[in-house]
Image (tube, grey):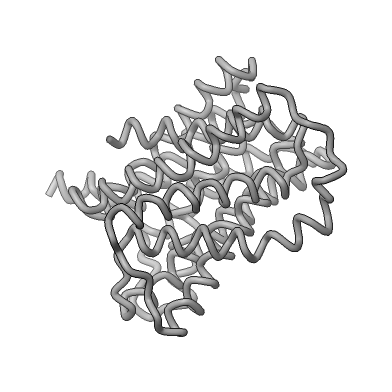
Amino acid sequence: MLGLLSLLWGGSFLFIGLAVREVPPLTVVWIRISIGAAALGMALWLTNEPLPRAQAAWRDMAVIAVLLCALPFCLIVWAQTHITAGLASILNATTPLWGAVAAHFLTRDDNLTPMRAAALGAGFLGVVVLMGWPQGAATLAILACLGAALSYGLAGVYARRLRRHGLKPLVAATMQLGLAATILLPVMLVVDRPWLLPVPSRTAALSLLALALLSTGLAYLVYFRIVALAGMSNALLVTFLVPPSAILLAWLGLGEALMLRQLLGMLLIGGGLVLLDGRWRRRRS
């Protein structure tokens, strides 16, 4: 199931790379989350799970919708108009590093131990290697991907507030996508004016559909199934698997090649994630 999830989320970078050739970034994101929300809403209806009535739950989920969906999706999709899908996926893998930084500064129970500091140092050194020398729009795109990873990390810290609402995973995922689609809709209409856009090709249309149904709707269902079976810490192992899947699919579908600098950066970030995860130390002990 982890392998399937890595293909679904790794495939999102391929589908985005194909879609943004013809469709503006905001429209790509809105189509992705709105169709994904509809798919999850159908699953919610089939399971007869009720939505919460408390205003506090909807307010907290609105913040999560921005931090976990609307903002990072827009940043990543825009970035892929300037950088490769493989590079975007590697930068996206820094999410746990940013999450550790956010938890250290915003909570009282996540101290920055020497081992965690070494993990962050290795990971961010990998980011420096990936960036190389400033390259205009490509540098801004790299920063956009890092901003998306930071947004994911902040969402992970803020999501702790959701425990008090007792939301089931499928309910939370459906609310999050539905609220993100609602928040992004007026922005997309003003900026992209989709009614003036040409009809996309079959390739772009199928990429958008796959992005919404496979890499969003189905991926969330698989992810929460893994969480239910093996726990959150095991589900986070997918972080290690998404970049190789994305790079392989981008090579097959977009003809992208992996540069030596990108490989070195990915290894450094992966090493940082291994140190941050800490499983290897527990197994040795």
Res 161 → quadrant: bottom left
Q: Is residue 154 left or right of residue 260?
A: left
Q: Which of the two residues, 24 or 77, is positioned nearer the viewer here?
A: 24
Residue 88 locus on image (x, y percent): 61, 38
Residue 241 locus on image (x, y percent): 39, 34
The residue drawn where x is 53% and y is 61% is 178
Number of marks in the image? 0
Q: Identify whether 15 is placed above or below 191.
A: above
The residue drawn where x is 54% and y is 30% is 264
Q: Residue furthest left?
A: 285
Q: Which of the two residues, 22 or 238, is positioned nearer the viewer here?
A: 22
Residue 233 locus on image (x, y percent): 27, 53
Q: Is residue 208 left or right of residue 272?
A: right
Res 207 → quadrant: top right
The residue drawn where x is 15% and y is 44% is 284
Res 25 → quadrant: top right
Q: Identify whether 146 is placed above or below 184.
A: above
* Quadrant of the drawing holding the N terminus: top left
Q: Residue furthest right?
A: 196
Residue 37 locus on image (x, y percent): 50, 53
The residue drawn where x is 73% and y is 24% is 201
Q: Is residue 266 left or right of residue 194?
A: left
Q: Identify whether 129 is placed above or below 110.
A: above
Q: Identify whether 251 is placed above or below 89.
A: above
Q: Which of the two residues, 7 or 187, is positioned nearer the viewer here?
A: 187
